[in-house]
Image (spheres, helix red, strand yellow):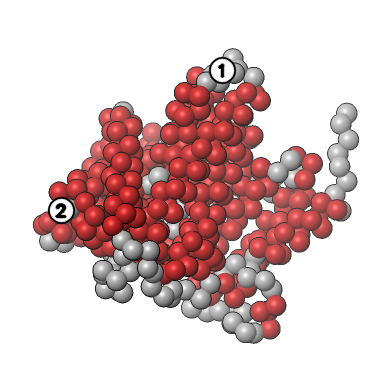
């Protein structure tokens, strides 16, 4: 049996895995724009940014594998292509976004320097840490998360007790689905698939003699506890943004709002401290993404150290190029890729969580194909070429007008393909 201490330690490790500093800039603006419907936005955001990622960890606990294992029931070729796309997106968007967040929160307000300088220095340091695989970052990471959590709880607490519960008018037509789509930008479901296996491996090392079911129970309880922590922080930041609707300009950026809220609640010194912590946390995230991508390529090229170095260099060069753009631009650029890859990631996570009898290879193939097909209109719409305009022929498909037209087709195909799949007899 596992103790409460083991559950809390594992829960904290999982919390730290998902609690990226870049994610902190998303909830406050959601609340700021949601007005009195902040709670609907919070539910939607936490569905895609908390619940699905935790399911991803549970899927890893079941599979005991890597990102490649998530899609292998569709086909090895699909799984390889999916893995390559995920890693390519990771080094091209969320990794550079950490540099942009660092510049906007910690560099520009105090030095006013060019974002080019920030991203060049930032990714030069990332490259040095990646090729040296220093353990310093893991030690720093263990201290960063608790410090950031304490400051955030203080910000949320001060906001709740110093503001009247009066909210503005929402700008969202559908707060719940808008919250879900903004949750895509956390990349947490992708994070669960990519690096969730690291947590599972470490648990297996520490409890190598424990029965499989005992380890699975530990991960499940810790997962739900970590999810509760994420929900409280995200919901707290969303309501904080909603309470401060009248204190900032409507067109304020995500990073400026987080800094502004921090200054108004705790003062300039605390905001400076938060800026430093967020920057360090962003840096550890970037190093983790580039290292993970380089490790993947190294493994595909028979443990070639040269492949590792070249991938790390390419990842850092991409980081410099993309990292000099502002955060809101990077988020806008990421949207089309997320509109296509996130639904696929969600269905792969859910298919790997459901009982084996409902997840035969035939079911995997059918559901993933349906999801891919019905994600194309959402992808095209996000780049300005809607295939199914609002109010058009295909508006009868539930959620089609909200860029989530894949949900019902995937569910229908899941049910139908299971009805037409003969259960395998045990030999």
Q: Of 310 and 72, which appears nearest the observer?
A: 72
Quadrant in which residue 103 is drawn: bottom left
Q: Could you say which quadrant of the image residue 273 lies in?
A: top left
Give the position of the N terminus as an image quadrant: top right
Q: Position of residue 374 (x, y in %)?
A: 65, 67
Q: Residues within 10 Å of mark 1 (few under 14, many from 20)?
A: few
Residue 343 % position (x, y): 59, 58
Residue farthest top in this picture:
209
Query: Relative to residue 260, is residue 218 depicted above or below?
Result: above
> Relative to the observer, which residue lies in front, 284 or 250?
250
Instruction: Identify residue for label 1.
Output: 208
Q: Is residue 256 visible?
A: yes
Q: Which mark is residue 268?
A: 2
Q: Could you say whether the residue bearing mark 2 is in a helix, strand or loop?
A: helix
Query: SS class of the residue under badge 1?
Result: loop
* Residue at 32% over, 50% down: 157
Q: Nearer the viewer, mark 1 or mark 2?
A: 2
Residue 413 in the image: state x and y as whole percent: 76, 59
Task: Name the spot of residue 97 as percent of width and height, x first.
Answer: 33, 56
Q: In the drawing, what numbered circle is on residue 171? A: none
Residue visible at 75% across and 39% down? 356
> Tag 2: Cα neighbours inside 10 Å, few (<14), some, or many (≥20)?
some
Q: Is residue 139 left or right of residue 216?
A: left
Nearest the viewer among 121 and 309 is 121
Question: Is residue 116 shown left or right of residue 244?
Answer: left
- Seen from the viewer's position, the closer of residues 386 and 180 is 180
Of the two numbered discs 1 and 2 on the same chain, state the one appearing first in sequence: 1
The Cα atoms of the two marked residues, 1 and 2, are separated by 48 Å
Q: Is residue 283 above or below residue 334?
A: above
The mark total stands at: 2
Q: Quadrant of the C terminus?
A: top right
């Amino acid at each position: 049996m596992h103790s409460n201490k083991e559950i809390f330690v594992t829960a904290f490790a999982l919390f730290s895995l998902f609690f990226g500093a870049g994610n902190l800039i998303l909830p406050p603006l959601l609340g700021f724009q949601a007005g009195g419907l902040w709670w609907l936005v919070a539910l939607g955001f936490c569905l895609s940014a908390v619940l699905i990622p935790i399911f991803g960890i549970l899927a890893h606990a079941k599979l005991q594998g890597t990102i490649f294992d998530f899609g292998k029931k569709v086909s090895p070729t699909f799984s390889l292509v999916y893995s390559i796309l995920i890693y390519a997106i990771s080094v091209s968007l969320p990794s550079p976004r950490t540099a942009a967040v660092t510049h906007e929160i910690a560099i520009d307000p105090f030095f006013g320097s060019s974002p080019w300088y920030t991203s060049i220095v930032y990714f030069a340091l990332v490259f040095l840490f990646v090729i040296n695989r220093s353990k310093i970052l893991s030690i720093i990471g263990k201290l960063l998360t608790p410090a950031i959590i304490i400051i955030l709880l203080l910000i949320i607490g001060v906001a709740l007790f110093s503001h009247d519960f009066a909210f503005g008018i929402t700008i969202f037509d559908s707060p719940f689905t808008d919250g879900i789509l903004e949750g895509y930008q956390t990349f947490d479901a992708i994070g669960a698939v990519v690096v969730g296996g690291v947590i599972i491996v470490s648990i297996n090392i520490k409890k190598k003699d424990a029965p499989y079911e005992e380890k699975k129970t530990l991960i499940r309880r810790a997962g739900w506890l970590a999810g509760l922590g994420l929900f409280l922080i995200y919901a707290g930041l969303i309501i904080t943004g909603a309470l401060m609707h009248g204190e900032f300009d409507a067109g304020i950026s995500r990073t400026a709002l987080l800094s502004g809220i921090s200054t108004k609640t705790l003062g300039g010194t605390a905001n400076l401290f938060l800026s430093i912590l967020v920057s360090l946390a962003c840096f550890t995230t970037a190093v983790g993404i580039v290292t993970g991508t380089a490790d993947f390529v190294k493994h595909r090229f028979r443990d070639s150290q040269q492949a590792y170095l070249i991938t790390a260099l390419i990842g850092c060069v991409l980081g410099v190029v993309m990292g000099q753009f502002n955060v809101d631009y990077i988020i806008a650029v990421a949207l089309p890729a997320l509109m296509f890859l996130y639904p696929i990631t969600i269905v792969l996570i859910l298919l790997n969580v459901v009982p084996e009898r409902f997840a035969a290879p035939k079911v995997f193939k059918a559901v993933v194909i349906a999801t891919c097909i019905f994600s194309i209109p959402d992808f095209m719409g996000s780049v300005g070429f809607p295939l199914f305009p609002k109010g058009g022929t295909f508006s009868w498909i539930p959620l089609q007008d909200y860029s989530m037209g894949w949900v019902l087709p995937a569910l229908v195909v899941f049910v139908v393909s299971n009805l037409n799949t003969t259960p395998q007899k045990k030999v």
